[in-house]
Amino acid sequence: MKFQLPTGHWLYFSAQVKKGNIKANTKLQDGFVEKVLSQTYAQLNWEMPDPELGINVKPDHVLLIVSGDITEAAKQYIYRHSLTKERRVLIWEKEQILRRCEEFGLPETVQHTILNYNANYKNK
């Protein structure tokens, strides 16, 4: 995703989507959070094409989208990381996603996909 500033400059966003919850409070779970942050760091250094400008660009920000929840311990671990302190990582959890859907709605194609899925699920 890209967003044009009033100055004419562009901000580029990349998304990292994780299914389920992100937890941290044991060594193993801290390792998982560190792995997520390593992937996020790699995304910030990844060049993606901008076909309208005909160049490759690096994202300015990464949206870390989690379908579940992030535990308080995991949030503290993430917020202590330099990428978050620099405000280059933006976090969306389940509740924020639902709020945005309620506020702005979903694209029509997504609504149809959900309705079709629900209809097929009920028939099984």
Image: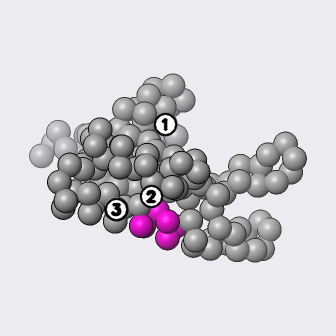
Where are the magenta residues, as a range? Answer: 38-43
Question: Crowdedness of circle 1 by 10 Å Cα count: few (<14), some, many (20+)?
Answer: few
Identify the image quadrant of the N terminus: bottom right
What is the three-letter code of the residue carrying label 2?
Gln
In 3D space, how far apart are the residues under numbered discs 2 and 3 (Cα atoms)? 14 Å
Q: Nearer the viewer, mark 1 or mark 2?
A: 2
Q: Which mark is residue 16?
A: 2
| Residue at screen point 63% across, 62% down | 59
Magenta span includes 64: no
| Residue at screen point 40% across, 55% down | 17
Q: Is residue 44 left or right of residue 6?
A: left
Label 1 with label 3: CB-CB less than 8 Å = no
| Residue at screen point 26% across, 57% down | 30
Q: Which mark is residue 34?
A: 3
| Residue at screen point 75% across, 74% down | 55
Label 1, on which residue? 106
In 3D space, how far apart are the residues under numbered discs 1 and 2 (Cα atoms)? 20 Å
Label 1 with label 2: CB-CB less than 8 Å = no
Q: Nearer the viewer, mark 1 or mark 3?
A: 3
**Which secondary structure lies at badge 2?**
strand
Residue 23, image x, y percentages: 24, 49
The rendered magenta stretch, by its main secondary structure, is classed as helix
What is the three-letter code of the residue carrying label 1?
Leu
Whether residue 112 is visible: no
**Which secondary structure lies at badge 3?**
helix
Nearer to me, 124 or 84: 84
Residue 104, image x, y percentages: 54, 29
Magenta span includes 42: yes
Between discs 1 and 3, the one toward the N terminus? 3
